[in-house]
Amino acid sequence: MTDFKQIENNLKKEAKKLLESAEVPVVLAYTRGYDEKHPMPFAAKSVADVEKIVFNEYCNFNMARYIMRFPDAAKIAIAAKAADSRALVVLIQEEKVRREDLVILGIPASGMKDPKTDQLIDSRTTGGLYNPVEYDILLGEEIRGQKTVSPYAVLADYEAMDKEARWAFWKGQLDKCIRCYACRKACPMCYCDPCFIDQNKPRWADKAPQSPGNMMYHLTRFHHLAGRCIDCGECSRACPVGIPLYLFHKKVAKECEEMFGQAAGMKLEDKPVLVDFRVEDSDQILK
Amino acid sequence: MLKKISIKKINDLAAALMEKGTLLAPVKEAAGHNFAEIKDPQQLDLDYYNTIVSPKTVFLPQKEDFVRYETAKPVAEAQPVALNIKATFLFGVRPCDAKSFQIMDIHFHASGIIDPYWQQRRDATVIFGSAFDLDIPAQDADFYQTLGIGAADPEGSDVFMVKKGEDLLMKAITPQGEEILARLAMLGEGKPADKKYFEEYIKKGSQHQTRNMCLDPQVIAKKLEDIFHSGEFWQAQSAACLSCGICTFVCPTCYCFDICDDTLFSRGVRRRVWDACMFTDFTLEASGHNPRTHVYQRLRQKVCHKYSFHVRKYGVISCVGCGRCTRYCPVNIDIYSIIQDAMKA
């Protein structure tokens, strides 16, 4: 595995080349935050900005989140880890960005950590992939031979619960929500403007952080992400009250994969499952 | 008046306070501590750094019901929701948060327009402030020293508490504090050595290192006015900002709210709910016009409100350096760094 420092150097080198040649006006990467453990998403716009780029085990933000912030840029370069690249694939499929307008700087990485808990970010809370699925330039050696655990293995306890227990579980979890909306804002797939929950006419839910409104917000969001969530885990890491949102997304992703034989954002040529119709599609959902 | 109690007997103290009113203290939840009502004396826990959400929730709950109504009935028949104020003990407030109540009082009381919901709760509450443990370094995000607040600063508390070995020293700071300490029979008298320890601890607290810069409120207020129109500065500072509401919701001095009518099948409640200047619809006008459509405008508003407009209007910075906004920001935006950069800009 290429170490983080080497990836940082490669990232700087490629960013410099791209900005120097004016091939792109923006390189989406990471910079140092208030300390090393707290890096920040960063838009490098000049060669001078390149020196500010960093990469370390805490750079776990999904950079695809920022791709639509530069409507004037003809082309954007973006540092993309496995999950970021899957998010880009979905955004390309959904025609939010064109593949030819992106320079994807792929980052193969394992050993990313959550700065809040210092725990390893792995298949328990994310898709658990190490290599980007789509890239133009790979900034390190592809990671091979690492032990892989199914991203759905973590669902075992959840799936052992019956319907009532699951309802009680989610009600308990979602009652904690303070409606700061960090989950949707950190999500690369949540780009609706306005989000249904912000609409005034009609108002879909109470603004107050309590059961019916919280359920309405989260259950709707969960379903809006069906077949689209690429399991980066950013929603759960962003949550200040520790709601394990990834569990619901994983469960839906698993069902999608079982029904339609396809995981979100894995291949550019795939059609999103909820857009694609095939005669042989599962009709389990109609039972 | 200085009293003390063995930390082993802290649950007796909790039981006594529960007899006299509602006891609110930091309670451990999945992601960390938060202020909540203590239902069982055994729940009282002194082993926390600070809470996720600030204790402003006690006086300004995220949801406050004002009036219940039925849309088919005349307005005069709408029923105001009773406040049901009870004597409350807010236990274990950190010095920066105790200070925040004084800043919030400006808006809910001292500005002349008294908010009865805030004020009645405030009047009914005794604040038991608690010093940070000086043996533990301050968390990286904190910068209360910059705002002139010590790690063991009794200002803003009615009773202030300091740990001394196996004991908890409790000193009355206000007449309200004197009164409650006098009514707690299980407390022992503080000895002269305890008094000395307490005073020294407070002094030592002001030296406890957090991030610190020399910050004159008038200077930073002016500086932010000067760079208000520098789109470049604010766009760079907000490049990572997701425009979520975490920073404002966990903040002890953010007080913006929305009044909503939540109606379901012709029955409804008019209530106050926290709002946040970081939300897209915060400034959305009835015409459909929105004066703040960009993320940088919203982040600029938050920073300038606290460090510039508030200083101009009330003479003080509306921030206590508790570090929550930085600690919980999903993309590590740090208001301290923004202020530092603004000073250099």
Image (cartoon, rainbow, N blue to C red):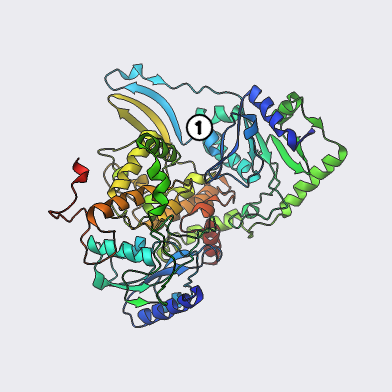
In the image, A285 versus A222, the foreground residue is: A285
Give the answer, above or below, for where A61 lies relative to A180.
Answer: below
Q: Residue B197: name its quadrant.
A: top right
Disc 1 residue crowd, few under 14, some 14–19, many 20+, Cα 10 Å: few
Chain where mark 1 sits: B
Q: Name the side, left or right, on which B137 lies relative to B337.
A: right
Image location (x, y in percent) of residue A75: 29, 72
Give the answer, above or below, for where A6 lies relative to A256.
Answer: below
Q: Amino acid at mark 1?
A: Ile
In the image, A36 versus A6, the foreground residue is: A6
Can residue A209 be seen in this snapshot? no
Image location (x, y in percent) of residue A216: 33, 39
In the image, A153 versus A238, the foreground residue is: A153
Q: How many marks?
A: 1
Give the answer, above or below, for where A5 lies relative to B296.
Answer: below
Of all residues, the one furthest to the left in this rendering is A279
On the image, numbered disc 1 is attached to which residue? B113
Residue in the picture at 58% in, 28% down = B39
Q: Residue A178: name its quadrant.
A: top left
Residue in the picture at 43% in, 55% down = A125
Image location (x, y in percent) of residue A58: 50, 64
In the image, B13 versus B205, the foreground residue is: B13
Q: Name the side, left or right, on which A254 lies relative to A169.
A: left
Task: Find numbered disc 1 in the image and state the secondary structure of the residue it sits on.
Answer: loop
Of all residues, the one furthest to the right in this rendering is B192
Can residue B27 be seen in this snapshot? yes
Indicate the quadrant containing the N terminus of chain B: top left, top right, bottom left or bottom right: top right
